[in-house]
Image (cartoon, grey):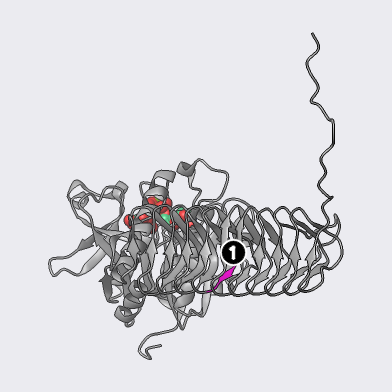
Amino acid sequence: MNDTMKPLNIVILAAGKGTRMYSDKPKVLHHLAGRPLLQHVLDCATQLQPRQVCVVYGHGGEAVPQAMSQYSAQFVLQEPQLGTGHAVQQAMPHLDDGSHTLVLYGDVPLMQHATLHQMQHAAGNGLVLLTVNLENPVGYGRIVRDAEGDVQRIVEEKDATPEEREISEVNTGILLAPTRELRAWLAKLQNNNAQGEYYLTDIVAMAVEQGLAVHTAQPAHAWEVEGINSKTQLAKLERTWQQVQAAHLLAQGVTLADPARIDIRGSLACGRDVEIDVGCIFEGDVNLGDNVRVGAYSVIRNATIAAGTRIAPYSHIDSSQVGANCHIGPFSRLRPGSKLADEVHIGNFVEVKNSEIAAGSKANHLSYIGDSTVGSKVNIGAGTITANYDGANKHRTVIGDNASTGANSVLIAPVTVGQGATLGAATVLRKDAPENQLTITAGRQQTVPGWKRPEKKK
Ligand code: UD1
Ligand code: MG
């Protein structure tokens, strides 16, 4: 941390009802890019290494603190909600006077750490307002400056004169203030305004009166300060964020069949010459190695895919690791705990769960491989099923290197197929199959002499 900067308290305002969401869920718990709005803000806040984070919540009972219990933040109930100034007042007992206090909004999810950092640098001993210039400033508080261009106060839309409404510089609501002074100003707030609320914005005129510097800063991107009040705004900001991420990937050299048709709900790291077809969804932390290709409409969550692997369309990969030069799909499903070595082929309608498959093995058609350890160069015949569940417990199947299972085999775990073993078609394997031998359990084929098909009675 820069030593000219004071330590930081962060207050996140999240008590608003969100009436226009038409939802029983508190507004800040609605998701953008796969995470609650408030979680985006908390993650950004955490990056600033604050001394204290205080979330002011209001609606939905304990839903907000419960949903965010992984953060070491203070949760303070604001009831009733008497305005933004009143909201910050609720947090004051938790803040220390030696720090600056940064006020963020829980429904403004895409605030970036760099912009806040810039505000910290601008602060000195004064106040910093994050402002933007809008062609259509309707609804926002306006930044009123004097002839020298110094900020005098903020006037809310509903309290503004027609001349003041012409001002295009608006308050984003995000501000940074010295905590000791903030405490004193908040204690003096009045609600004699058009909305009968305690306005946080009234502290600006108090700072000016006291001779404190009021600085302004601007966000690097307009989308950083966009707030969510409705599902329409949520959907719009979601698209904006997806475009931002797609542009980032393109700039790094990733080929996207259509940057408007990719969804990243988390983080996606890509090597060189990665190609991603349309309609893919990436969730959690996904890592794609060099030359990986992802086919259309695949869903990949918390997975690592090593270099050169091809994923054909409609594949679903969750909490798994895939080695280099594998062929996955189309229509493959890798469930949590699947670990594939290099050059493994998993084909259509094959489901793998909590299993390790060593290099060069193939399961190309219609199989279930669960709780299994599969050696290298194994051929899993079409329709092979590991029966891993006895109705009460799960058991493991072990298949040795170079083994081959016949089509439609059922391996009843716990069971081992020895190295180089071959299972005949439709084997129901209840005991271990010895190495390098053919094991057959299906009945002998017979032809019944003299049998005739029944004929329809007249
Ligand atoms: C506020 C600002 C306005 C600014 C605008 C930017 C004030 C008085 N006005 O207006 O200058 O241009 O934001 O969007 O600050 N909240 C609480 N408790 C409350 C009231 C609000 O937690 O009692 C929270 C809301 O959930 C929201 C934020 O504070 O996250 C802002 O509240 P909102 O009602 O949207 O403020 P505006 O009237 O739009
Ligand atoms: Mg309001």
Can you name the residue that lies furthest to the bottom here? Answer: 3
Measuring from the top left, give residue 138's x and y in whole percent: 27, 47
Mark 1, residue position? 68
Asked if residue 126 is positioned above or below residue 316 in the image, the reply reads below
Q: Is residue 192 visible?
A: no
Measuring from the top left, give residue 88's x and y in whole percent: 47, 64
Please say whether residue 321 is one of the residues in the magenta stretch: yes
In the visual, does 188 lie left or right of 70? left
Circle 1 residues within 10 Å: few <14, some 14–19, many ≥20: some
Task: Kindly report the secondary structure that dominates the magenta region of the rendered protein.
Answer: loop
Q: Amino acid at mark 1?
A: Met
Q: Out of 331 and 83, give the one closest to the viewer.
A: 331
Q: Out of 427 and 73, give the one closest to the viewer.
A: 427
Measuring from the top left, give residue 372's x and y in whole percent: 73, 68
- Locate the N terminus by quadrant: bottom left
Image point (38%, 58%), residue name: 242
Can you name the residue that lies furthest to the top here? Answer: 458
Q: Out of 37 and 207, give the one closest to the viewer.
A: 37
Measuring from the top left, give residue 150's x and y in whole percent: 19, 70
| Segment tinted magenta in the rendering | 319-323
In the visual, does 100 lie left or right of 164? right
SS category of the residue bearing label 1: loop
